[in-house]
Each structure stands twice: as structure tokens, then as C-alpha cells.
Amino acid sequence: MNRPFCSPRIWWQALLLAAATWLAVMAVFGRWTWADWSAPHWLEGDPLEVYARVKIAAEQPRHALASFSDPARLGAPYVADWRAYTVPDRIVFVLTGLLSRSFGLVAAVQLVSALGFVLNAVSFFLCARWLGRRWEWAAAAALGFAFCNYNLRWGITLSLAQTFTLPPLVLLCAYAARPAPVRRRLPWLALGAALGCWLALGNPYLAFFAGVVASGGGVLALLRRAPRSRVAPLAVFLVTLALVFIAANFHYARAHWGAAETSSLARDPSDFQRYALRPLEWFVPPADHRLSALAALGRAYQANSSAGEFFYAYLGVLGGAGLVGLVLLSLHRARRFPLRQAALGGLLWIVAFGLPYGVNSWLGHAGLDVFRASTRIAIFAAVWVAFFLAAIASRLTHRWPRGLSVAAASILAGFMIWEQTPSLSARTARQANVARLDAQQELMARLEAELPRGAMIFQLPVAPFPEAGRIAALPDYEHFLPFLFSTELHFSYGHLGSAAALRWERSIAHLPPRKMVGELQQTGFAALWIDRRGFADEAVALVRELQMAKLPEIAVPAGLPVNIFRLRPVPRPTLPDPTMPFFYEPWGVTETDDPPVRALAVDGWYPPEREGDRAWRWASQRAILGLWNTDVARQKVRVTFVPIGRPPARLQLHSGGRTLWEGAFADVSNKPQSVDLVLTPELNRLTWKLDGKTFVPGRNDRRRLGFALENLSVELK
């Protein structure tokens, strides 16, 4: 049944498939010339972060390979500290960065992304051939898998689309569950160790879900009473995966679960329902499908659901039919051999794990809250379905003439690629992106010529990294653009949302324009970068004030929505201490001068809001209020507030491991409450926790709200 890999014929077939996959990439993305490879399809949101990682790896390859924790030109006047933010696939990013030195940043990323499609196809093909499938149908199914929606959409990340590890992992699980005796165990042990190591060093989502599927395979092996020698490779995989994963992500895990202020990513419990796996989405086409009728279906589903990433799970028309056939055939066979239906068992397991309120949701509520998007485990269905289609097609065409079988496989492979991919070959969008890149490169060349070597640029609006979301009309990660096309300039963007340096940046941004300029010059900044899209008034008032101050303005290419003002840094700049309490944002819209106790929005609060004599701040699930006692002695104070929230949720106030106050919104909402405290002469942190569900207000307000504190006041007793 199994074909040995030592056959030269199989490797020639794999090589031909690799060439066919590369040609398919060129056709799908319209990359027929070198200019096409250097023109980005996407230049907004997550792709900019990918380009930034590659740029950092190109400039600091040894550092990036070791940790990626200190990007030298980001986070000015300090150095951005990314120890609390995991950067997976460092080997891939370093290799891509080195490649970019010769081929350019965009071309290098797109070449490596294309290589990912090739690896995904070849890996599946070799596994299908090992199972004895006819080469033409193994190749057709491999192309269908390589260009499935998940791999296509995540290809630009160079990380989540590395699914070439999944077909051999599925084989490893099937191998472990067979009760037959073992002949050659060493290759399987090596495969288990290699897969575990690569996945652990790669994207955490793929590693986590691979561990979930492998654990299910281990349970099936135990139920089928498979020999220990067969289970050993799967055990090696799980142990290797766990140990290497812990070692590779230890710093991030310690920061994420250590304290609220050191976590770089905010996770809300409701995200485990929003981004959960929904089996229906294996069949729902994306809103940009090539066929207008199917695209309309996708848009209708998107408009009437709260799904976060539904289009990644789509299996295509043939894939959806294959999934139905796989389930029906497995159910029929399960009457006689229930434990032999590994694919059906795997599907049931990932559905039970990824459903809203499924196993993953329970893990999230228990504290493992970083893997919210369980919909991404749906990629394993694409593996099982592709194996099923290759097997059925090989069986049905077994008596066909080889030429007819090859022709049929080629037609179906072309259809699967065409039907699963949106129309991406048009040059219009790419030409617009190229124009943006050309303008950025022109501007960066001008800045590096006019500013001193290694000059620091302060960027407005201040934005945290990562996942800041849109600020007014400014998309996320846009502040990376000048960094991508410069070589010596340092930029203020890049601090994690939990960083003390970000608090300093925000305090500077809240100063009056002329005072802000003075503080920046004292710190050593040589220029002020203002992206007008990040301001409600398009920064009209700020730009006018700076122009009235007679600051020299640097010319910007037409079409770029930025203003750049040149500053005069002092000869000996002073570096502020960002950990000082006064850099936290004041609680209210306005504060009295030098109060003895200052209320500060330390962590987790949305901006202040006011209406008449009412003032409040919203939070989601957890937030920290700071009370800064500026006196040298202890102070007795009374904190008065009006809690706002939706029943049946409850709100709790904690400090120093003690519960200071709690109440159910059914009883206390919109009713004044007070708490008496003794404050030490320092920053005192009060942690508010919501026990209940959050909600989204709707319309244009996409904030996830849980509770608010209205008319908060602090009085000395």
C-alpha cells in the first residue's frame, strides 16, 4: 500500500508539482514580471507588521534569531521592549530579511510566501503518495489544499500559512492509532521530533492546535489498544512540542500571566465566542468570491453574523462536497468499525474543541486566554477532506486510461484553485500601493538627507503596538511605513501597550503644542511626524498652531497625508524616567492643580466621556485605577463613584489581595457608592474586575464594554 520515498520517480513528480504550484501562484496573484513581485497586494494592517519584522531581521539578524525583543530603531528615545510580545518563526523571518538585502523588502516577502504554497503542496503530495494514492490525484488534492482559503488569506503572514507540517502530523496520528505491529520505528520517531520542534518554534496557534489534534490521536490510539511502539512517535511529538514551545515562549508567558500591566495583548472572554469555530463556515463562501451569487451569499452571512474570521474556513465547492461525503461514508462504516473512523473522530474532536462555549472557551475562562480564535483549527478539516478526495478519486479512476485520469485531475485542480481564490491578478490596487511606496521612499530619502544621522522622529497620533486598531481614519501599523523605507532614522512608534514609555509618549501628546515641542527638543527629537488621518479634525488645529510657532516644515510628496516639522534638539538631551506616576493619564478630562491625591487611569480604561455634570470612563473586563498619594505620609481617603453596568453581572474592587468592595449591577448600578482607604505615599493600584459578559454598543462604536465608573471623586478624611 505505501510507496517508499526512495523512488526517484516520486521526487521527480514532487519537483514537477513544485513548479506547477509556483506557476499557479504567479497566475493567481498576477506576478509575471519582477515589477509584479515587487508590488505589494496588501499594504494596510497585518502585512505592515510582517514587513516590519522582516526589516528588523534584515538589520539585526543575530538579535532577531535569538529573541526579537529589542528592535533598535523603534521606540525612540528608548528602545522598544518586545519581550512581552512573542514573535514566532524567527528562522523564517531572518532568512526573509537576509533575502530582502538582495531582492528588496516586498519582493522577498512575496517570494517566501510563494515558497510557502510550494511547501504546502509538496508536503501533502508526498503524504498522499505514501498512502498509495495515484500521483495525478495526489497532486490535484495537494494543489487544492495549498490554495485553500486559509492558506491564501494567511500567506502574507509567513507564519500561519506554514501548514506543510499538518499532513505529516495527521499521518503520524493515524500511524499511532493502528494496532498492527511496527516494522521501522526510527523514521517515525525522527518525524515526530522534527514536527514538534518546528511547530513549537513557529506560530503559537498552529502549535497549540497541532497539540490538540495530536492529543486526540493519542486518545484514539489508547482506545484501539495500539502497541506502545506505535504510540511512541506521537508521544515524542507531544513532548518535544511542549518542551520547545515553553522554552521559546517563556518570556511572553511570564509577562502575559504575570501582571495586567505587562501583558501586550488584551483578550476578552467574549472573543472565545466571536472567533469560535462554526462548522457552517466550512461551506459559506467569502464575500469576495469570484462568482457573484456566492459572493452575495458570503456578504449576507457576514452582515448577519458576529463571526470574526469566517472566510478562512471555507473549503470550496469540491471541498464542501468532500466533507459531506467523508462524514456520510464514515458514519456508514462506523456501524461495523466505530474506532477505525479516524478522520470523522478528528472532525468531531476539533468541532467540540472549537465551538462557541466548547473546550477552548472553557480553557479561556480558566486562564489560557491567548488562543481565542479557535476557528483557525478548521484548517485540519482541509487536510482530512483533501486526503479523502484523493482516495476517492484514485479509487474511481483506477481502471481509467492514465491520460484520461491525468486530464480529469488537471481540470479539477484548476477549478479548485480558481474557485477558492478571489480575483487578485488586477494591477490597479497594486499600482496604488506602489505609488504609496514610491512616495514613502522619496520622503525617507529627503529626511535622511536633511536630518542628522540617527535622528529621532516623534510620531502622532501616539499608538500602541500591536493591535491598536484604527485611530480615527488611521489604519493599524501605519506608523511602520517610514521605518520600512529608512536605514538610520529612529521612530517613537513600537512600544507595547503595557510599556511605561508609551505612557510618557501619551503624556507628551496631551501637552499644548508649543510645550510639546519644547519637551521633545529637550529629549532630543529632531522632527515631529503628524499623520492627519489619526485626528478627528485631521490635525488642522495642531498643524496651524505649529505653523504659527514658525517651525520649519519639511516638504512632503503629494498624496501623503502627513505633516513633518523640523525640531531643534538640545545638544545634551535628557532622557525622562517613564515609570514616574505623573506620566499615567489623569482620570478626568480636567484635573485641579497639584491635588494631594491624583486619580490616574493606569490600565484598561477607555478615554473619558462627559455630558453636563456627568463624567465617566468605560472599561471592558478588568481595569486598574491608580491613586497617587503625593504626600510623604499615609493619607486616609474616601473614594466615591457611581458604577454602571448591565445585570446580572457583578463588579469587584481589589487591592493588595483583598476585596474592598463588590456589588451586583442589579442592586448598585447608577447608585452612588463609597470606599474608605488608607493610601501609602506612592502609587496605589485599585483593580476592578467584572464578573459577567461584556457587550458592544453597536453602530459605529465597536468597543467591548463591561462597566463604567461615573463621577469618581477622592476626598481626604
Image: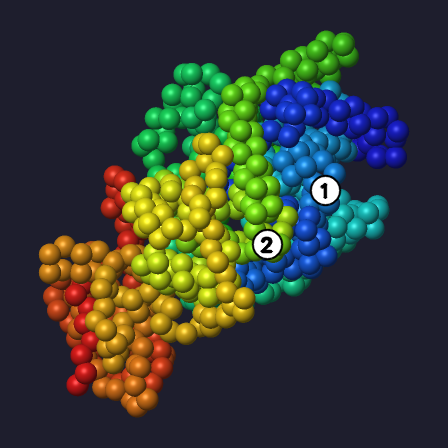
Q: Is residue 313 left or right of residue 397?
A: left
Residue 93 seen? yes
Total of numbered circles in the picture?
Answer: 2
Q: Position of residue 33 (x, y in %)?
A: 68, 21
Viewport quadrant of the N terminus: top right
State the residue at coordinates (20%, 76%): 714
Q: Which residue is labeled 1 in the image? A: 101
State the residue at coordinates (42%, 47%): 530
Residue 449 vs residue 368, the one in the foreground: 449
Residue type highlighted by circle 2: Pro
**Helix, strand, or loop for circle 2?**
loop
Q: Can you say whether 590 is above or below 455 in the image? A: below
Q: Position of residue 668 (x, y in %)?
A: 15, 66
- Residue 236 in which image quadrant: bottom right
At label 2, counting other C-alpha atoms closer than 10 Å, the crowd grade (few under 14, some 14-19, many 20 or more) is few
Q: Position of residue 338 (x, y in %)?
A: 57, 39
Q: Which residue is labeled 2 in the image? A: 452
Q: Is residue 325 left or right of residue 243?
A: left
Residue 143 seen? no
Cα gap from disc 2 to disc 1, whole angstroms: 24 Å
Residue 280 vs residue 154, the one in the foreground: 154
At label 1, counting other C-alpha atoms closer than 10 Å, the crowd grade (few under 14, some 14-19, many 20 or more) is few
Residue type highlighted by circle 1: Arg
Q: Is residue 131 left or right of residue 211?
A: right
State the residue at coordinates (19%, 83%): 716
**Helix, strand, or loop for circle 1?**
helix
